[in-house]
Amino acid sequence: MKAAPFEHHEPTTVDEAVSLLASVDEATVLAGGQSQVPLMRFRLSTPETVVDINGIEELNYVREADGHLRIGALTRHADVEESDLVADRYGSFADAAPEIGDPQIRNRGTVAGSIAQADPKGDWGSVVLAHDGELVARGPDGRRTIPADEFFLFPYETDLAGDELLTEVRVPAAREREGSAYRKLKRKVGDYAMAGVATRVILDGDGTIETAGIGLTSVDLTNSRAAEAEAVLEGEAPSADVFREAAEAAREECNPETDEHGDAEYKRRMVGVLTQRALADAVERAGIPVERGRAAQ
């Protein structure tokens, strides 16, 4: 099948793109197009207007600035995968990037586009949640910063308004004793996650966990945060026992559904296993060797 007829616009600045979005009733933003184009080809999505932002060069960057890691809206998954900055300081991002689809998808798809799609099986939403991240949008009324905790509303639905353009994904810059990781279970290369867990820890001078973040993939209506598991960790010394306790809390918090990938109880168990492994990875990256112990089943 071919896509239904539509108007195609190619702005070269953010202001031009925002003006276009504000001038029509409904428009679809096209960045990487790895999800949107197939939907249009099968006429599951039939936008009358497409605003193609690939010509906005100012939105393609991965950098640290003003206390944040900043990822522009046209940054491809492969750009994150190949970034030395990410590899050196942001373990969860470095782990997640090569797990996205296949090389073709990673070379064209964008981090921001994946987050804006809000597929609960997508990886980046969980990573940004674990890092206390924010999404930066531009609309007719100016710039708006949306905490990741408030961004995901329902599957494929976000707090982003129809006349707003998501311009940047950002998380707090990594601190000296910080580590993060992402662990994902999938059936084969290129698949979405059956379950995934992103973790971030910040250690104090005594090696105690000062701050913890845990984001969950594919086990709820949206990418979600395991707040009770985070609370278990904060103020505790890293150990196999405390990781198991946090894993049990994460298992209780998640809400998976039985589908073709596995039953709900299996996914719940895998959340526990992945949480322990990702926490151990994050703490080691923060500079403390840990006893991993046996994963909870």
Image (cartoon, helix red, strand yellow):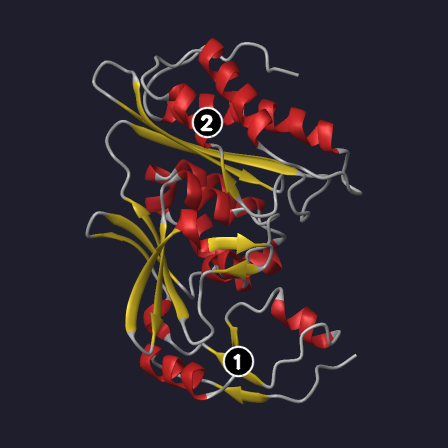
Vertical order, 205 against 194 (above or below): above
Of pointers 1 and 2, the one earlier in the residue sequence: 1
Q: Position of residue 268 (x, y in %)?
A: 66, 28
Circle 1: element type? loop
Mark 1, Cα crowd under 10 Å, few <14 / some 14-19 / many 20+, is many
Name the kind of residue labelled 2 in the image: Glu
Q: Which mark is residue 27?
A: 1
CA separation, marks 1 and 2? Answer: 39 Å
Q: Position of residue 5 (x, y in %)?
A: 67, 89
- Relative horizontal placement of residue 173, taking residue 149 as reference (left or right): left
Circle 2: element type? helix
Name the kind of residue labelled 1 in the image: Ala
Vertical order, 232 against 127 (above or below): above
Q: Quadrant of the C terminus?
A: top right
Query: Contact (CB < 8 A) between labels 1 and 2?
Result: no
Q: Quadrant of the N terminus?
A: bottom right
Nearer to me, 237 or 96: 237
Residue under circle 2? 228
